[in-house]
Image (spheres, rainbow, N blue to C red):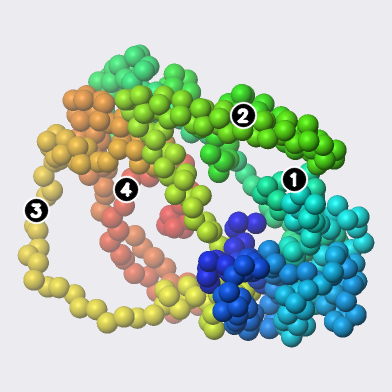
Amino acid sequence: MRSRLVNVERITDRLMVVKIALDNEPCLNVISAYAPQVGCSELTKMEFWNDMELLLQSIPPQENTLICGDLNAHVGSQNTNYPGVHGGLGYGVSNGPGENLLQVLEAYNHSVVNSYFKKENDHLITYKSGNMATQIDFITCNRDILGKFKDCKVIPGEPLTTQHRLLVADLKVVQQRLNRVNKGPPKIRWHRMESCVDFIPKIRSYLRLHHNGTAKEMWSAFESFAVGSAKQMLGESKGGLQSNKETWWWNEEVQKATTDKKEKFKTWQKSKTDINLANYKLAKSNTKKIVATAKSEASDKLYDEHTVQGETRIYKIAKQRSRDALDYLGLRYINDERGNIITDGDKINQRWKTYYDKLLNEEFPSEFSTTETPVEGPLLPIEVEEVRDAVRAMKNAKATGPDSIPTELWKKMGEDGLIWLTSLFNSIDQDTLHFLVTIKDKVNSTESENDNRVEVPISVIVLDENDNAPEFQNI
């Protein structure tokens, strides 16, 4: 679902809206609201509902809207004054804020989803404190999608806060079946090079013995040897999907305490006895202590690791926290020329085609510089010092290319690696040929007057007979 987020907008401290794009359906705007409670001033309440109405007016009429949150109002078990807004299956007695809420919902063609499903009182009460039990948390929707809701109820056994209960609604949305997410390819554990004492000498020994041949032969043989040796000696990761959960401090003791706290909460909710309440509070306090201790011990252990692995782990945790703080990571949908969101797959592809046709075929004014002095004569061979400077300038911890060989490997090869790379680079220049290719015009070959040929100078790297590049098959 996170990939479907289009926009997240925070209106005020009490209002925010999330826009979700759905395949071949209008966008869904989910408004999270926290209405002012009884003790707030009338001005604060008026400002909240003014902001709410402005937000509802800003949403395009073709899009769907949900309002979810603590609206601090009682709509009552029944209310015949607002047909289509109140379903007649609520809880309690309505009050002034409840009447105001129903008026706003009627003006914007909304219905209270809570009031359309017959439930026991425990599945209607959203707030309970002592002997007080009320329904002040609601889910509302525009009437066009009311029929898509299959259920709406409170889950008594799940504590949202100490007094509020979790309200859940089932909304049926027909979506295209997404392609199965493939796991990432396995990655070689190059960070183990230092701990594996035999790996670096093995690669350096290979470089000293194999520095002759064409550039393609040299690189193909080295790539095969280095990657094969690394897989065998350093190992590979499984290539699993990365989890967004922060579990670096989690352990079995925390798991056990958390499970025990949940079980005691459910027991207390069913029995409502003082003994079970005391047991739940004790388990809750104990869980907090265990979690705090686990985090502290994990942090101390992490910061005591003054190694490259410890530093890398710290950066991973920081990167994960930064990524988790983002409202949305990426989009599956794009906007059309007018800024409207496209959710149809064929239209998305057509939009991309139109965009790139325009992007890559527009001419821009440009000037060619003629002040550079042309260089004449043969190229001088590459020296070892040039390669040394280039390797030194390469950055560590960067993603590998198609060959899967990282920068760190070359920096650990020493003089053997520099000499081998110098030989490789000079072989590339020697393998370059200049020759003439006769190209025949693509016209009707049965007419001799159309048999036009032209000779074009071509400069390419030598290819062997196994290269199947289409641009060379017809030469």
x, y (%) of residue 287? 61, 31
Q: Secondary structure at mark 1?
A: strand
x, y (%) of residue 81? 87, 83
For marks 1 and 3 on the same chain, the one whose residue lies earlier in the sequence: 1
- Left or right of residue 465, residue 217 in this image: left
Give the quarter of the image for residue 276: top right
What residue sits right under mark 2 in the picture? Answer: 286
What residue sits right under mark 3 in the picture? Answer: 377
For marks 2 and 4 on the same chain, the one whose residue lies earlier in the sequence: 2
x, y (%) of residue 59? 63, 80
Between 265 and 323, the residue placed more toward the observer is 265
Other residues around mark 3 within 10 Å, as few (<14) / some (14–19) / many (≥20)? few
Of labels 1 and 2, the one closer to you:
2
Other residues around mark 2 within 10 Å, as few (<14) / some (14–19) / many (≥20)? some
- Left or right of residue 281, residue 471 in this image: left
Residue kind at label 2, given as amino acid type: Asn
Other residues around mark 4 within 10 Å, as few (<14) / some (14–19) / many (≥20)? some
Give how far apart the Cα atoms at labels 2 and 4 are: 70 Å
Number of the label disc, if any, that sits on residue 158: 1
Please tell me which residue is depicted at 65% across the width and 56% down the height of the picture: 1
Quadrant into which the C terminus falls: bottom left
What residue sits right under mark 4 in the picture? Answer: 461
Between 118 and 333, the residue placed more toward the observer is 118
Of labels 3 and 2, the one closer to you:
2
Cβ–Cβ below 8 Å for labels 3 and 2?
Answer: no
For marks 1 and 2 on the same chain, the one whose residue lies earlier in the sequence: 1
For marks 4 and 1 on the same chain, the one whose residue lies earlier in the sequence: 1
Tell me: residue 281, above or below residue 99. above
Residue kind at label 4, given as amino acid type: Ile
Please tell me which residue is depicted at 51% across the width and 32% down the height of the picture: 292
